[in-house]
Image (tube, helix red, strand yellow):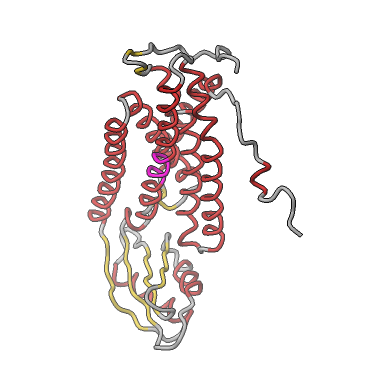
Amino acid sequence: MIMRGWPLIKLLPQKTNFRFVRYAPIMGVISAVVCAASIVACFYPGLNMGIDFRGGASLEVAKPAGQVLDLGAVRDAVGETGLGDVQVQGIDSESNAIVRFQIPEGEDQTEVVQRVEAAISDAVGEVTYSGVSVVGSKVSGELFMSGMLALGSAVVLMFLYIWFRFEPQFGFGAIAGLVHDVILTFGVIALFRLEFSLNMVAAILTVIGYSMNDTVVVFDRLRENLRKYKTMPLREVIDLSINETLSRTIITGITAIMVLAALALLGGEALFGFSIALMMGIIIGTYSSIYVGTPIILLWGVKRGGAVEEAEPIKLGMASRP
């Protein structure tokens, strides 16, 4: 028997009429406060730097052919040595893994590596070691600067793309949303003491791409509606455009979050921080496309019919009734 009303997505309202612009001032203040708190958190207590950015050592561990290497036992054994951050990543087959760990300041690197090897051998039995390498603080600093340069370059390129595709004020709205998303994602990483590594840089770059995609969808609809409703007040056109893309925005975000939640729960410790950061970043990016990027256009004004419509002051309670 086929259920009536299926699929269940039909239960969602096909048309909404929320007055987003009306609450833009309140949301703007909240965003500014949270961004300021995130910046402070990145310096105090600071980011929890991983081995990639703090330096450490890595070695490859291999069991004899046909035997399975227990990654959990390796991780626990190295963690009990008191060397701080430990990463264990399986490679090629179930019998090989790469182990990364920190080397405390003042301790001899050779002795620390030998201690780790002894702990792993006691935990999982006969194994062979190879590919031992040490990443110094100088190399870690260069990696950190490269990661920050990648983030900055992504934001600038996104700004140029929006400027090229739309009008300059759309570009300023987009760049404000991207900066907002990056700062708050850093705040989440600092708040939850997630390990900041190259994986986190990849997560933030993904958030930038997702947020920009969401923003472009809203901007495209806004541009269409500006041409279609040439006499409608700008704030009403903005509300209309956001409402028309709202279902797409929410459904896309929820779908991505569901996948990331499964990855966080089942992907193991190595992917947990990456999944949480990306999940929160998508939520932040969805919020910014509604309450950060688009309201800025109202402040700048847009071209309509060859003339520039003057910017309107955003005041609570001044939104026109639908």
Residue 240 shown left or right of residue 199 in the figure: right
Quadrant, the C terminus: top right
* Numbered label tally: 0
The segment highlighted magenta reads 207-213
Residue 112's place in the image compared with 214, above or below, is below
Place residue 219 in its image quadrant.
top left
Residue at left offset 27%, top offset 54% = 140
Image-based side of 246 in relation to 198, left or right = right
Closest to the observer: 232 or 152?
Answer: 232
Q: Residue 230 in the image: x percent, y percent?
A: 43, 17
Q: Is residue 230 above or below residue 33?
A: above
* Residue 11 in the figure: left or right of residue 178: right
- Residue 264 x, y percent position in the rendering: 53, 57
The residue at the point 48 percent across, 54 percent down is 275
Q: Residue drawn at (41%, 69%), measured in percent from left and top?
A: 89
Percent x, y for residue 38? 45, 35
Instruction: Please tell me whether residue 290 belongs to the stretch shown in magenta.
Output: no
Which image quarter holds the N terminus? bottom right
> Is residue 185 visible in this depiction of the protein?
yes
- Where residue 142 appears, as percent x and y from the top left, is 23, 51
Camera-side residue of 235 and 24: 235
In the rendered image, the residue lying farthest to the right is 1
- Secondary structure predominantly adopted by residues drawn in magenta: helix
Give above or below for 235 relative to 122.
above
At 33% from the left and 68% from the top, the residue drawn is: 58
Q: In this view, does 300 lie above or below 206?
A: above
Q: Is residue 296 visible?
A: no
Q: Nearer the viewer, residue 163 or 26?
A: 163
